[in-house]
Amino acid sequence: MQNSSPPSPPLPALASSSFNLRDPKSLLYFFLAPSLLFLLLFILFLSSSSSSPSHSRPDPYLFPTQQTHRIVYDNNSPSDPTPPSIAYLISGSRGDAGRVLRLLFATYHPRNNYLLHLDPFAPQAERESLALRVQSNPIFKAAQNVDVMGKADFVYPKGSSPLSFTLHGASILLRLSENWDWFISLNAGDYPLVTQDDLLHIFSFLPKDINFMNHSSYIGWKESRKLRPIIVDPGLYLAEGTEMFFATQRRDYPDAYRLFTGSSFSILSRSFMEFCILATDNLPRILLMYFANTPSSLSHYFPTVLCNSRQFQKTVINKNLVYASFDKSKLRAEPRLLNSSDFNDMVKCGAAFARKFQPDDPVLDLIDKKLLGRSPQTVVPGGWCLGEPGNGTCSTWGDAGILRPGRGSRRLEKAIVELLSNDTLRSCKCIPE
Ligand SMILES: *[C@@H]1O[C@H](CO)[C@@H](O)[C@H](O)[C@H]1NC(C)=O
Ligand SMILES: *[C@@H]1O[C@H](CO)[C@@H](O)[C@H](O)[C@H]1NC(C)=O
Ligand SMILES: *[C@@H]1O[C@H](CO)[C@@H](O)[C@H](O)[C@H]1NC(C)=O
Ligand SMILES: *[C@@H]1O[C@H](CO)[C@@H](O)[C@H](O)[C@H]1NC(C)=O
């Protein structure tokens, strides 16, 4: 639980590069200092000897230590396992602050961790206003689980910089919290199709080391167009993004390891993210250097590391739980924009997320209303919301360990059970095709 261990002190590197909700603490000290030095020393002594000062901890109503809270509100059967938690990296570009915030509301749960990012095309004012809007929200303040990256990372979608950004975001999230179990990276154009209570409920029954990731070792002409060219991503060496550099030569496929292709969306376990970031085994680092010169390397890197690692190749399920629709006639396999006509298919397929949507497309309102039960400008309600039904449901809160899964959890359960019950061997392991 978050309140049983003191929050880790903000990292020096992070303090300058992220707006943090724990700032009021330093402000308070600042005001106390001139007038009451003695009191200050006393408080400092208290804060270093006790676990931490009360205002730097998440609200104890959300994370009660005592079982008594649980009994008062808990409708779940006692055999239900403890809910897991998810770390979300949510990223957007210029003009995306509104979509990033909406996606945060739609995927919010006090148990999770969120790191928001706007790339360098967004002006600093937009980043600051996003941070202010996060900071002024009472529930984000109480749970202390939303951070905004103050310094932007360059993300050139067709190159390899998105991979470096994703690893950077994941490593910040690893330092921010010791508690999360899965990592999900979302773009401003993505949207959830189930509530967080649904998702956390279903995931609480899964082994914590499982990874959901589309992957294939089949390399046809389409894939070879992404794997053989040699590029240099401008984001890796130029301050301003320009066109990508293509070498005239092409390279052969490696024979020291096998390449796998996949999709840029995946749900990855904490242990696998630690494997990639700490890299005590050299494989993730070698592949990082290999993919530095490959276009769209984000969709190849994680499948290739996972499937070439003996430790992890048995933990992968060949499906990423995202609904996307591809225009087969187009050369570049970008998912097409979804609209209201896709709503029934999205619901039927039992996915947890869908991509991609236009800003404020009416289908998002339909998803909010029919699937998430969310009102505009409010977080998606869950078992922790104790207010009257309506806009203010989540302005009164209780134990974040209580989940109220709904119909979405049954859709997700059905999809995952089907996935596991079919030819498990074929769907779960990285079998070369
Ligand atoms: C992932 O694979 C499934 C089939 O297993 C496919 O339907 C889906 O479109 C793929 N998703 C992406 C984003 O590539
Ligand atoms: C949704 O998009 C498809 C193809 O892009 C189009 O044929 C359809 O008319 C659109 N539906 C609506 C409701 O806009
Ligand atoms: C919720 O808020 C919206 C505007 O933010 C308003 O139009 C709507 O009437 C409110 N609903 C309730 C039940 O208070
Ligand atoms: C699972 O098996 C059912 C029939 O048994 C089939 O209809 C379905 O397409 C299979 N799903 C996958 C993901 O292979």
Image: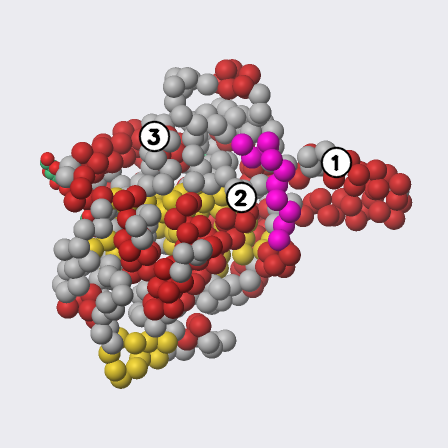
Image quarter of the N terminus: top right
As shown in the figure, which amino acid type bears the numbered disc 1? Answer: Ser
Residue 317 position (above or below residue 84): below
Residue on which disc 3 sits: 205
As shown in the figure, which amino acid type bears the numbered disc 3? Answer: Phe
Residue 7 falls inside the magenta stretch: yes
Seen from the viewer's position, the closer of residues 272 and 221 is: 272
- The quarter of the image that holds ligand 4 is top left
Q: What residue is drawn where x is 36% and y is 54%?
A: 189
Q: Position of 296 compared to 62: left or right?
A: left
Residue on which disc 2 sits: 177
Task: Identify the magenta region.
Answer: 1-11
Tell me the element at label 2.
loop
- Which mark, residue 49? 1
Q: Main secondary structure of the magenta part?
A: loop
Place of residue 90 in the rendered image (x, y in percent of width and height, measured from the top left): 44, 52
